Amino acid sequence: MTMAGGVGRTDSVGRLKTPISILGSRLSKWGLPAIIGIGIIFPLVAGNYWIDVAVYWGIYVLLGLSLNIIVGEVGLFNMGHSAFFAIGAYTTAILSERFGVSLWLLLPLSGLAAGVAGYILAKPIIHLRGDYLLIVTIGLNEIIRITLLNNPWGLTGGPNGIIVLDQFRIFGYTIQSPMDFYYLVWGLVAICVFVLVRIQQSRIGRCWNYVREDEIAAEAMGIDTRWAKLAAFTLGAAIAGATGTVFAAKLVVISPESFTFMESVILFCIVVLGGMGSIPGVILGSAGMMVLPELLRNFAQYRMLFFGLALVLMMIFRPQGLWPSRRWTTILREGEGE
């Protein structure tokens, strides 16, 4: 059925299909296979420099997805996320170099270590909200970084850091070239996206969103909001910690300077710019924060001016982010139509 003037069509149940929704359905049908195909072919035609850029983009996608659980799904302000990234990386470096533990085994072990740390650190502060929680997480980030700098028990190497000589191996093949790391990192991104989409559609995912929208109403419905927030904080920290293993293997030398407060700011910007609660938004926001600076390298002295202007324009014209969560946009539209 076509509306007057050909503005739109309706589907079998009478819902309006605008040109934008039609385009979105076509993109969902053909866009994803095309993107996957381009992603597979990219390292075969690109130089090592751009492959490395894509590797670090993938690492920050993983970190952005982990923070998105805390900030986007539950609505907790966390500006200390790089601390869990650091815990994972240093757990990998210490256990690998001192005890010879395989990196494949360290991938879940680092996630477990960071997840436990996230639970322990979040438990006494999870009742805080807004700016108060934000300030505390900034302090936690600096406590972890300074602890690493002080080289406790001679484990962290102080300012010099630790060298990670081990590499990932698959059936005797060593993953060490930029192309190898590209497929490893983006393979992990695909797994992480699949798991997080399933979580979003699960009971715990809905609980997180209820807590984000109205914590008091969620409590009145019988949701244990404290448990829900702790679960989100723990899972986000665990994914960041596991990402630290890949980062340590790629960078080889890790030091406290890789986990400063500015790293947490970048991750926070990735989630906010992309759209809180949106997985595609995190991927797009990571591209804006990691790939775009490389494209503007010839204008290095103006890069910060560009980013500042972009943030101001985003807050004015697109406060919901570049790619906001479709679930809650749909809910709001349905609510307006009733």
Image (cartoon, helix red, strand yellow):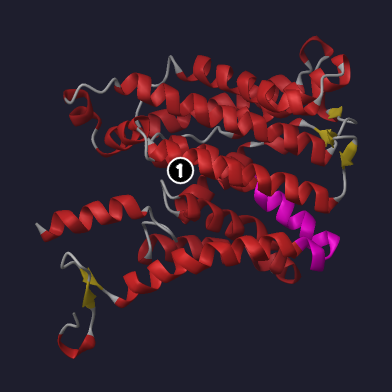
Give the x, y percent position of residue 250. 81, 41
The answer to whether residue 46 of the structure is visible from this angle is no
Q: Is residue 143 above or below residue 317?
A: above
Is residue 252 inside the magenta stretch? no
The answer to whether residue 168 of the structure is visible from this angle is yes
Figure quadrant of residue 297: bottom right
Q: Residue at x 38, y 63 (%)?
A: 318
Is residue 52 inside the magenta stretch? yes
Q: Residue at x 43, y 50 (%)?
A: 278
Q: Secondary structure at mark 1?
A: helix
Q: Residue furthest left?
A: 338
Crowding around mark 1 (Cα neighbors within 10 Å: few <14, some 14 to 19, many 20+) is few
Q: Is 14 on the left-hand or right-hand side of 53?
A: left
Give the x, y percent position of residue 135. 46, 30
As shown in the figure, which amino acid type bears the numbered disc 1? Val
Give the x, y percent position of residue 122. 47, 20
Q: Is residue 259 above or below residue 148?
A: below
What segment carries the magenta color? 43-59
Q: Is residue 175 above or below residue 234?
A: below
According to the image, label 1 marks what residue?
A: 197
Give the x, y percent position of residue 313. 43, 66
Q: Quadrant of the N terminus?
A: bottom left
Q: Main secondary structure of the magenta part?
A: helix
